[in-house]
Image: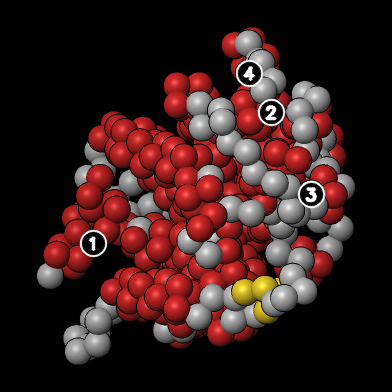
Amino acid sequence: MTVRTIETPADAAAPRSRLPGTTTQILIGLVVGVLIGYLWPSSTDAAGAHVVGFAESIKPIADTFLRMIKMIIAPLLFSTLVVGIAGTGDLKAMGRIGLKAIIYFELATTIALFLGLGLVNVFKPGVGVHVTVSQSIDAIAATKPLTGWQLLTHLFPTSVIQAMAEGEILQLVVFSIFFGMAVAAVGKKGQPIVDVLEAVAQTMFKFTGYVMRFAPFGVLAAIAATVGKKGLAILFTLGKLVLLMYGGLIVFAVLVLGVVSLLIRVPFLTFLKAIREPFLIAFTTASSEAALPKALEVMERFGCPKNIVGFVLPTGYSFNLDGTTLYLSLASVFVAQQFGVEMNAGQQIFMMLTLMLTSKGVAGVPRAALVVLTATLGQFNLPLEGAAILLAIDQIMDMGRTAVNVMGNCIATAVVARWEGVFDDRQLQEFARRRAA
């Protein structure tokens, strides 16, 4: 079976626009959003009731943008993954790709966990912090991560339509893999399906371009609502933890992912330029899903085959949460420090192993990091009030860890492509040349 290459709209020559590029527009939206949040924040009245300010009132614009992104994901992911796999059609090949991806995922998340553990023990951000608990953690604590067998069962959807509707990315990946192999197995009779899905994929890439025109407005509203509701004061109250986490994320991104980029012979600065749009979208919206369509498009243009891009990126959303795992190691020991609970090295390492396992079972769960954190705190008899305190700054923390999650999954795609010997260096050079032009 022959499979034609999907060309994204960005591959075609386009006249230069006088308007700033999408990345610049997003950055402008970010700055304007911060200013709006600072100048028109929410407040409380004399009775202590919450009064919504202008900055928080425009949050529906951000919610609308995120809904637009989510409606793209299912058809885009299904079409690109099936077309990519139909060209391989080999269970052995897909199994090999999956094994390599999982090996890399576990190595990267282990490094992230122990980096966070080292930073929190050296700088001790929880010592001397006294914050009044003003928010309940009960609803989050009631949500439990999936166990090993539950996670295995959860991989297989009872209905692919339901999986699409509920945004179950991992279930959609599993269905698409089997469907793609079945299409390849029927030979020429499956070619019409491939042709249709190629057309769907090209259409969805064009669709993504339309939606991305609204990104600056969605980013502006999202960041304005965050600053307007939380204010900048909370950054000073728990500023040491916030700075430590962002410092850790920068160290991980530059040193760890930079070394990985060097090992796979991919210029790190070129890689950063390539993923800047999905990175900024993930950072400003604190949503990995919002960045997925653009990340899929960019990594395919960057030189990674579509079957690897379509498999590794969405799978990494469940198994390769580098930013989240670094945050979890920081936050769990922070709570222990805050409440004066002594934990020796063995207890901390055991807690890290627990975090590594439980974090795999929260894909698609709102406030996933807090769900894992509360479950782990309860298991180690640490106060859940610590998670309630972190809830106050979770949006600010979520922005950084989500952006690094997306960055980590993009480099993972390049790692697996290089490991498989199918990374297209000529396409990478052409991509770099277009970016420099």
Q: Amino acid at mark 3?
A: Ile
Q: Quick check: 131 left or right of 209? A: right
Residues under labels 1 and 3: Cα distance? 46 Å
Q: Is residue 123 visible?
A: yes
Residue on which disc 2 sits: 339
Q: Earlier in the sequence, mark 2 or mark 3?
A: 3
The tag on residue 431 is 1
Give the quarter of the figure containing the C terminus.
bottom left
Across and down, in percent, residue 336 comes to: 66, 26
Tell me the SS state at disc 1: helix
Query: Dot 1, crowdedness within 10 Å: few (<14), some or many (≥20)?
Result: some
Across and down, in percent, residue 220 comes to: 45, 77
Q: Nearer the viewer, residue 34 or 82?
A: 34
Q: Is residue 300 visible?
A: no
Quarter location, residue 15: bottom left
Query: Dot 4, crowdedness within 10 Å: few (<14), some or many (≥20)?
Result: some
Q: At x 79% / y 49%, what residue is drawn?
A: 137
Residue on which disc 3 sits: 137
Tell me the SS state at disc 4: helix
Q: Earlier in the sequence, mark 4 or mark 2?
A: 2
Q: Amino acid at mark 1?
A: Phe
Residues under labels 2 and 3: Cα distance? 17 Å
Please state the total of marks drawn on the protein image: 4
Q: Quick check: 220 left or right of 431? A: right
For the view shown, which residue lies furthest in the front direction?
Answer: 46
The tag on residue 348 is 4
Against 331, residue 238 (above or below) is below
